[in-house]
Image: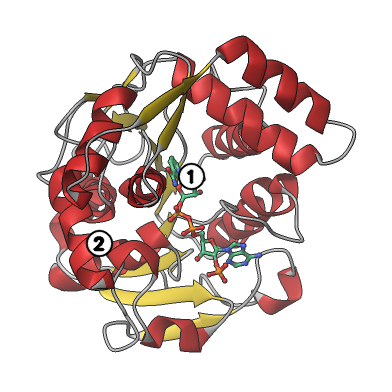
Amino acid sequence: MRKSRIYPNGELGKEGVLRVLVAGASGYLGRFIAEELKARGHWIRVLVRDADALKVPGRYLAPAIHGLVDEIFVGDVTKPNTLEHVCQNIDVLISALGITRQSGASHMDVDYQGNKNLLHLALQASVRKFIYVHVFNASILQFLENVQAKQKFVDDLQGSGMAHTVLCPTGFFSDMTEFLQMAKKGRVYLIGDGISRINPIHGADLAKVCVDAIACDVEELSVGGPVTYTYQQIAETAFSAVKRPPVIWHLPMGMIRTAVSLLYPFSRRLYGIGRGLIALMQIDSVAPESGTHTLAQYYEQILSAEF
Ligand SMILES: NC(=O)c1ccc[n+]([C@@H]2O[C@H](COP(=O)([O-])OP(=O)(O)OC[C@H]3O[C@@H](n4cnc5c(N)ncnc54)[C@H](OP(=O)(O)O)[C@@H]3O)[C@@H](O)[C@H]2O)c1
């Protein structure tokens, strides 16, 4: 943990209502961040590409936030001409912005350059703190394109002179939904023996940490959810939620490695996803615990919402 030079005693958080810009506010985490900021009485501007998307709930039980936010700024971080004045009169910028699904743009375009464009504007507008959502275990996962782009931005942020906190979370509950979908179909596939461990985190729990970071004088913070599971246990939790006996297939690591390497000439994207999955299933992703939500509760809620 490194200490910030600029707000050594969490001064920023002691000032009552702040004006906060949330980038990536239409995404899974961004929606929970906006909700948490509002619950604490802050003034919020959100940067989104599609204002209407905020009128309906997001995927994985993320809230609709259209009625909560004070100002909607429509812009695209890859198009700097759409971002003029986005940081005007803003105290704190929280970025949960990035590519997590298929997209026409690259990780370098969005995760790196898009955040860099925001940092540039934040410095010009004298924004007082930048809170950025990075990933846990970035140094081990450096070979992945998304992690490279995110780390490159973190390096720039750290060298920029801007007060900042970089949050490094483990996997989100949104990503753990895939195990539930497989269990519903009757079979969960794991790569390898499934004994690696992870403490995934719910968006609402991570949003609290993001908002607490406003007043926090630590520059880098790793965080995970309150319960640590092996991947085998996550699969079993998913089967228990769908009330089916567990049918878990362990795919041999060597076979998957070969299959993924064959993807390279055809699809760099699928190759990247495959390498990411292999890496994640081989290493422990256990970070300091935070929050209260468990996967069993989350799976129940997803199933009730579908019903
Ligand atoms: N998911 C995980 O397990 C995990 C784990 C650790 C860290 N993280 C990081 O945490 C952050 C948030 O993840 P998430 O799961 O909440 O992601 P998400 O649901 O995919 O949300 C990403 C957000 O970025 C926005 N965005 C993408 N390209 C943009 C552009 N060109 N201009 C403006 N906005 C753009 C999206 O807007 P649209 O709605 O318009 O697409 C969306 O609001 C990401 O940086 C991710 O890398 C995720």
Q: Residue at x 34, y 45 (%)?
A: 183
Disc 2 vs disc 1: which is toward the camera? 2
Q: Which mark is residue 128?
A: none
Amino acid carrying mark 2 in the image? Ile
Amino acid carrying mark 1 in the image? Met
Q: Residue at x 82, y 26 (%)?
A: 262
The image quadrant that residue 61 belongs to is bottom left
Q: Is residue 71 above or below residue 255?
A: below
Q: Specify which label sits upstream in the sequence, 2 or 1.
A: 1
Q: Is residue 178 left or right of residue 299?
A: right
Q: Residue at x 69, y 78 (%)?
A: 82
* Residue named by callout 2: 302
Label 2 SS = helix
Q: Is residue 137 visible?
A: no
* Residue named by callout 1: 162
The residue lying toward the viewer, choosing from 206 and 81, is: 206
For label 1, the crowd category at 10 Å Cα-Cα, with few meaning under 14, some 14 to 19 and many 20 or more, is many
Calculate the distance from the C-alpha at mark 2 to the C-alpha at mark 1. Answer: 39 Å
Quadrant position of the C terminus in the picture: bottom left
> Which x, y percent locates residue 289?
17, 30
The residue lying toward the viewer, choosing from 63 and 125, is: 63
Q: Is residue 20 above or below residue 268?
A: below
Q: Residue at x 20, y 73 (%)?
A: 38
Mark 2 CB within 8 Å of ligand 1: no
> Which x, y percent locates residue 45?
40, 77
Q: Is residue 73 visible?
A: yes
Quadrant position of the N terminus in the picture: top left
> Which x, y percent locates residue 217?
26, 36
> Which x, y percent locates residue 58?
38, 72
